[in-house]
Structure formats: C-alpha cells, structure tokens
Image (spheres, rainbow, N blue to C red):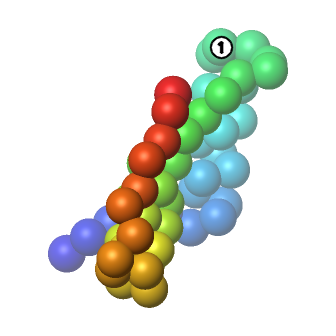
C-alpha cells in the first residue's frame, strides 16, 4: 500500500525544512513530477520530452 501525504503533512515537512535550512529554499516533490510526467505521456504519446537542469 502506498503512503499518500496530505496537504497538512506536506506543510509540516516544508516548515521543518525551512527551519532547518532557512529560507528561501527550493524543494522538489519528485512524486508529483512523476505523476505529471506520466499524465503528460498518456495524453501525448508521440511527443518526446526534453528538459534542462
């Protein structure tokens, strides 16, 4: 069974990170990125995705 974080849980985690690292801080939700990517590929199967970091 997958663990799903609530918005409140995410808020708590982000506040903890902000206290530990200070602000501004950049946080990436990898699970959300994967979800968005899979949804994109499902809707645009013939499109090649490129990105830069």
Q: Indicate the position of residue 5 as horizontal and vertical percent values.
A: 48, 63
Q: Residue at x 33, y 66 (%)?
A: 3
Q: Residue furthest left?
A: 1
The N terminus: image quadrant: bottom left
Q: Can residue 35 be seen in the rendering of this structure?
A: no
Secondary structure, mark 1, is: helix
Choose between 39 and 6: the one closer to the eye: 39
Left or right, 30 with reference to 3:
right
Q: Is residue 45 above or below residue 6?
A: below
Q: Residue furthest top?
A: 21
Q: Residues within 10 Å of mark 1 (few under 14, many from 20)?
A: few
Q: Is residue 37 above or below residue 19?
A: below
Q: Indicate the position of residue 24 as horizontal and vertical percent values.
A: 80, 21
Q: Residue furthest bottom?
A: 43
Q: Indicate the position of residue 29 as horizontal and vertical percent values.
A: 51, 48
Determine which quarter of the picture holds residue 15. top right
**Residue of label 1:** 21
Q: Residue at x 65, y 14 (%)?
A: 21
Left or right, 19 with reference to 9:
right
Determine which quarter of the picture holds residue 43. bottom left
Choose between 35 and 25: the one closer to the eye: 35
Left or right, 3 with reference to 35:
left
């Amino acid at each position: 069974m997958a663990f799903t974080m609530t918005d409140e849980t995410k808020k708590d985690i982000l506040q903890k990170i902000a206290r530990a690292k200070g602000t501004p801080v950049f946080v990436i939700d990898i699970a959300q990125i994967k979800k968005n990517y899979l949804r994109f590929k499902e809707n645009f199967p013939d499109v090649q995705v490129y990105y830069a970091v």
